[in-house]
Amino acid sequence: MKVILLDDDRIALDYLEQQLQQIPGIEIVGKFTDPAAGRKEIINQPVDLLFLDTQLPDVDGIQLAEEILQIKPDLKIVFVTGYEAYAVKAFELNALDYLLKPVKSERLMNTLQRIDRSQTVFDLDRLAQQNQSLQIKMLGHFQMILDQKQLPPLRWRTTRAQELFLYMLQCRGQFIRKSTLIELLWPEYEPNRAFSLLYTVIYHIRKTLEQYEEYFSLTNSVDGYILNLNNVLVDVEEWENFILSSPPVTNKTIGEYTGMMKLFKDDYLKEYDYWWAESERQRLKMLWLRTSFRMAEWYMSSHQQSKAVEKYLEICHQHPIAEEAHFALMKIFAANKNSLAVHRQYRLLVAILLEEFNEQPSTYITDWYDDWKQAHEE
C-alpha cells in the first residue's frame, strides 16, 4: 500500500513515519509539511492512502481532502488530529477516518486493518453491481434495491450527513450552493465553523457512497455541489414522469394508471420530518389528488360506479379536506337513494372542516344538501 503523510508538525510526521515503517506492506512514497507541495505530489503520483493533519497552515485539512477527492475519488484518507476526544467527535466521522495524536501503534494497526477489510468488500460489491440498475424508493420508507434485493440501510455517522444526502438526492442533477446548504443545516454557526462542518459531512457522504460509486457522483466547484445519478431508477421520478406525460384515461390506459398509482402508497420520505421535504411532499400529493380525480371521473363516465366510489373514498381517506370527493360521494349515494349515506358523508365533511379550519363546507355543497334534504323530507 503506497502511503503519503502530510502534517506541518515535523515531530509528529517523523513519529508516524517510524510507526508505519514497522508495518509490512506499507510503502511511504512521500511526507510533507507544506500543504501545496503535498497536494501536488498526491495528485501526480500513484498513492493508496493519505494520512492528513486536520489543521494545516493557511488551509483546512478537511477542505483539502475534499479537493483531493474530486481528482482522486478512490484515495483513502485518514485524518490525524491533535484535538481532544470531544473535538474529534465534532468532526462527525467514524473511527476509520481519524487518529488522535500522539498516534498509538495499536490504534494505527486497527485502522489499517479496517481499510483493508473495507477495500475487499468494496471490490466485491463493485464486481457484483456491474451493469445492474440501482432502485431508490423515496415514497414511503427510504430503500435501495439492487438485483431485486433490498440493500442494508446506509450507515450514517450523524443525522446531519443523512439529511444532507437526502436533500442532495431530492435536488439530484442540480447545482446546490454551499451557502444554501449552510443556511439549511447550520444557520446559527459563524461562517468558518459552518464551512468546516459542511466539508466534514461532505467527506463522510463520499465515504459512505464509495461502495456505490458506479451509481453516485458527487462533484464540487468553488461555490457548490452536484449529486449526479448513473443507472439509477428513482421511484418518485418514474411516477411523476408517468403522471405528467400520461395519455387520457381510457379503457386501454386505465390499467397503467392503476398500476402507477399503487406506487404512491405513502408520503414522500415519510419517516423524515425535514422542513425542506414538506413542500415537495405537498406538491406530489397534489399530483396524486389531481390524477385520482381524473380516474374517478372516468369511472363515472364509463358507468363503473362502484370503482368510482372506491376512488372517491380513497381520496377522502388520503385528503380528508377534499370537498369535491365528499360531494361526489353524496351525489352518488343520493342517486342510489341511500339517504343514510348522504347524511353521513355530509356530516363527516362538516366535522372535518370544522376541526381543521373552523369553517363550513362551500356554499354550493350546503345549498345542494339543503335542497336535497328538503326534497326528501316532503
Image: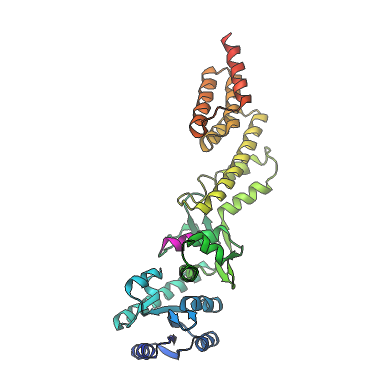
From this view, report whether residue 193 is shown above or below residue 140. Answer: below
From what the image shows, is residue 295 above or below residue 181? Answer: above
Residue found at x 48% / y 54%: 142
Q: Which residues are magenta?
A: 158-163
Q: Residue at x 47, y 59 (%)?
A: 163
Residue 102 location in percent, x, y? 32, 83
Instruction: State which quarter of the image contains the N terminus.
Output: bottom left
Evaluate whether residue 146 shows in this view.
no
Indicate left or right for 95 with 128 as reference. left
What is the residue that sits farthest to the right in this orientation? 248
Location of residue 94 in the rendering, given as x and y in whole percent from the top left corner: 38, 70
Residue 14 lies in the magenta stretch: no
Instruction: Give the image location of residue 219, x and y in percent.
Output: 57, 71
The C terminus is located in which quarter? top right
Q: Is residue 246 above or below residue 51?
A: above
Kindly indicate the quadrant of the structure image that contains residue 293. top right
- Residue at the location (53% across, 77% down)? 67
